[in-house]
Image (spheres, helix red, strand yellow):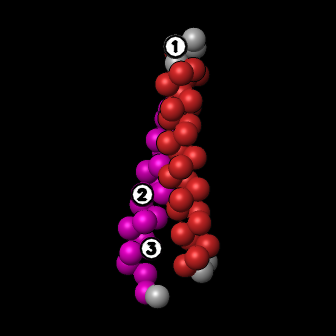
Amino acid sequence: MSNSALEKLIWVLIYAGLLAVCLGLFVRLRDGAFGLSIIAGGATASAVGAFLVWVRARRGP
C-alpha cells in the first residue's frame, strides 16, 4: 500500500470513527445497548486510525 493511500485510509478511519461516536452518544439516549455498540465501533475505528498514524510515521518516504 502506498503512503498516500495509507494516509487517506487513516483520515477516513479517524473521522468516521469520531462521527460514529457522536452518533452513538445520541442514539444511546433512546436505545442504550445499540448506542453503546455504535460507540464501541467508532472508538475502535478511531483507535485503528491512530495506530496507522504510528505505522505511517515509522515508514520511509
Residue at left offset 56%, top offset 37% = 20
State the image quarter where residue 54 is shown: bottom left
In which quadrant of the rendered image does the N terminus lie? bottom right
- Residue 28 image offset from top left, x and y in percent: 52, 18
Q: CA distance from mark 3 to mark 2?
A: 10 Å
Q: Is residue 16 left or right of residue 51?
A: right
Q: Is residue 56 left or right of residue 38?
A: left
Q: Is residue 10 above or below residue 21?
A: below
Q: CA distance from mark 2 to mark 1?
A: 28 Å
Residue at left offset 56%, top offset 71% = 6
| Element class at badge 3 | helix
Residue at left offset 57%, top offset 20% = 27
State the image quarter where residue 2 is shown: bottom right
Q: CA distance from mark 3 to mark 1?
A: 37 Å
Judging by the rendered image, the residue that carries numbered circle 1 is: 29
Judging by the rendered image, the residue that carries numbered circle 3 is: 56
* 3 or 1: tag closer to the N-terminus: 1
In magenta, the rendered stretch is: 39-60
What amino acid type should be assigned to the residue bearing mark 2? Ala
Evaluate if marks 3 and 1 touch, with contact meaning CB atoms under 8 Å apart: no
Judging by the rendered image, the residue that carries numbered circle 2 is: 50
What amino acid type should be assigned to the residue bearing mark 3? Arg
The residue nearer to you, when weighing 58 against 11, is 11
